[in-house]
Amino acid sequence: MTTIDLTPIAPEQLREPRPAVRRVPLSRLTQVELRKMFDTRSGFWLMAGIVIAALVAAGAVIAFGREGELTYSTFAKIIRIPIAVILPMIAILSITGEWSQRSGLTTFTLVPHRGRVILAKAISSVAVGVVSMLLVFAIGALGNVVGSAVTGAPLVWDVSLTLGLYFVLGNVLSLLIGFMLGVLIRASSGAIVAYFVYSGLLPTLFGFLATSQGWFRELQPWVDVQYAQSVLFVFGAPLTGEQWANIGVTGVIWLVVPLVVGVRLAVRSEVK
Amino acid sequence: MITIDALTKRYGGFTAVDGIGFTARAGRVTGFLGPNGAGKSTTMRIMVGLTAPTSGSVTIGGRRFSDLPNPGLEVGVLLDASAQHAGRTGREILAIAQRTMGVPASRIRAMTDLVSLTDAEADRRVGNYSLGMRQRLGIATALIGDPEVLILDEPANGLDPAGIRWMRDLLRGYADRGGTVLLSSHLLHEIEVIADDIVMIGNGRIVSQGTKAELLRGAGTIARAADLGELERALGAWGLAVSRSGDGALRADADPTVVGMVALKAGIALTELRPAEGAGLEEMFLALTADTQREGAVA
């Protein structure tokens, strides 16, 4: 026997039919994550800090640079120094904020696939890194022109496209190391400390080992990630195959493997 | 509709959620009641995929939460109103949710109006919000995708009496339009006034569940008369279990109709006769909390 439900339903109680729900696309997630990097006071000032630091560094080169040093590559190298500190912080905070500030409770319920959120954050972090490097080149060029006009030194454009790309790659790699530590540690202060250990303490230890132990000197380019990547920032000769191999091997050891471990942990961890 | 089946979560040797199973139905408000630490929040986190269960399953409208393509449009979630980046404005938090779900930007304004956040308040950073404002913002975030299911953990926390009234009316209207509402609380009264169905848990297990009417029916009748002893004897003579309640009334395990008839036959004038609303539930709840009560340990 069939029963007929005669419960009256007022017209306003009927829900509007909804178009078929589709999966949230990665492009939209990336835009949202990019927005989240700017929309807090700390995020805004980190971004503003990149521009301010670049301008200050360019000014310092003009003011204190010795004769013959006022070349485009000098500007790029010096401007990079403060930015190389800020960029990994931006990448770290983009990840750790979800845990430290607990906004992950919302983020990971709106997108219950944490791997996709982490990927969106990685893409937006790299985008910020690349744009920052373009900014470095732009402010460097401005500094170079102004510096030459002020000091009367000849204008020197000593950065080829290839060397410029090396430079961008190197900075994106150090940003990704920060990103990896954020994913692995998932706490802002811990990840920032770990980054300074990674970028400051470890290279010093490896350097000490290399000068005191002869056997290590040969090994260092294959073990020390900072040493291997340092060739990307010197604006020297094109990289040899072995130098690329050094970057690849150290990148797998110090970046890819811990990143894979970190993503697996982050995906499984409990968000509270 | 939310269906929870044999859900268990263990942390090492500690079982936080122990074989919980119940259904939150559409068109009804289901109250999830239990003392602090009973496993309510853990159960709710498992529902939305933030915590992995040891065993068991949760489905929402027949699908697992992680299989929902755009969960914000189907399930509104508020687990902890304070879990927001303190440096974002309320409006920005709504904008992030709106962008993620891909709903029109006009929903932001609709939601701030719905939860009565003024423009000035919406433009303030959440770090400066009171808990009540955070709860309102959390409700707005949960509702922005116009979902059919709401999962709210202690939503009345920090709201003033007018705010609690507002929340009650909002959720009532939502359920009356066919929505499913699951809300938790550690306050019996809060659940009593709003829920249609009640699921009570203690130490990770369900101790009682049913419609509010069912749970309250078992509570018996409160009666008063000028001569309590006479009424007590009359009821006892009919084989009804009677006990004295603390405030000088009798509690009988029977319908008010039966108690009234007994009093009439015995020629006793009643001064009060009413169903003992919630008393049974309250006793159960107090028994549950007694083990963990700090007050009990001191006494």
Image (cartoon, coloured by chain):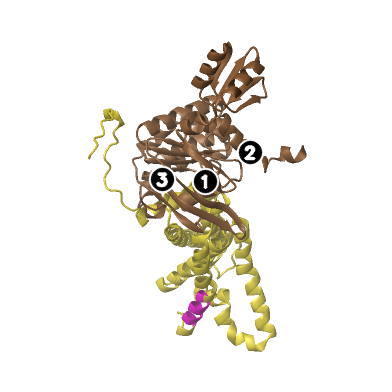
Chain colours: A yellow, B brown
Residue B2: x and y in percent read 41, 45
**Residue to which mark 1 is pinned:** A40
The answer to whether B96 appears left or right of A65 in the picture is: left
What number is the disc on residue B145?
A: none
CA gap, disc 1 to disc 3? 36 Å
- From the image, which quarter does the N terminus of chain B lie in? top left
| Image quadrant assignment for residue B146 | top left
Residue B200: x and y in percent read 53, 40
Pointers 2 and 3 within a single chain: yes
Instruction: Check whether the beta carbons of the residues at disc 1 and disc 2 lie within 8 A of each other.
Output: no
CA gap, disc 1 to disc 2? 47 Å
- State how many labels appear: 3
Foreground residue, A240 or B224? B224
Task: Please say whether residue A248 is one of the residues in the magenta stretch.
Answer: yes
Chain letter of the residue carrying label 3 = B
- How packed is label 3: few (under 14 Cα within 10 Å), some, or many (20 or more)? many
Q: Secondary structure at mark 3?
A: strand
User: In the image, is residue B250 above or below residue B34?
Assistant: above
Q: Is residue A182 visible?
A: yes
**Residue to which mark 2 is pinned:** B287
Nearer to us: label 1 or label 3? 3
CA gap, disc 2 to disc 3? 28 Å
Residue A238: x and y in percent read 45, 79
Residue visible at 62% across and 41% down in the picture: B288
**Residue to which mark 3 is pinned:** B2
Range drawn in magenta: A243-252
Chain letter of the residue carrying label 2 = B
- How packed is label 1: few (under 14 Cα within 10 Å), some, or many (20 or more)? some
- From the image, which quarter does the C terminus of chain B lie in? top right
Pointers 1 and 3 within a single chain: no
- Amino acid type, residue under disc 2 in the picture: Ala
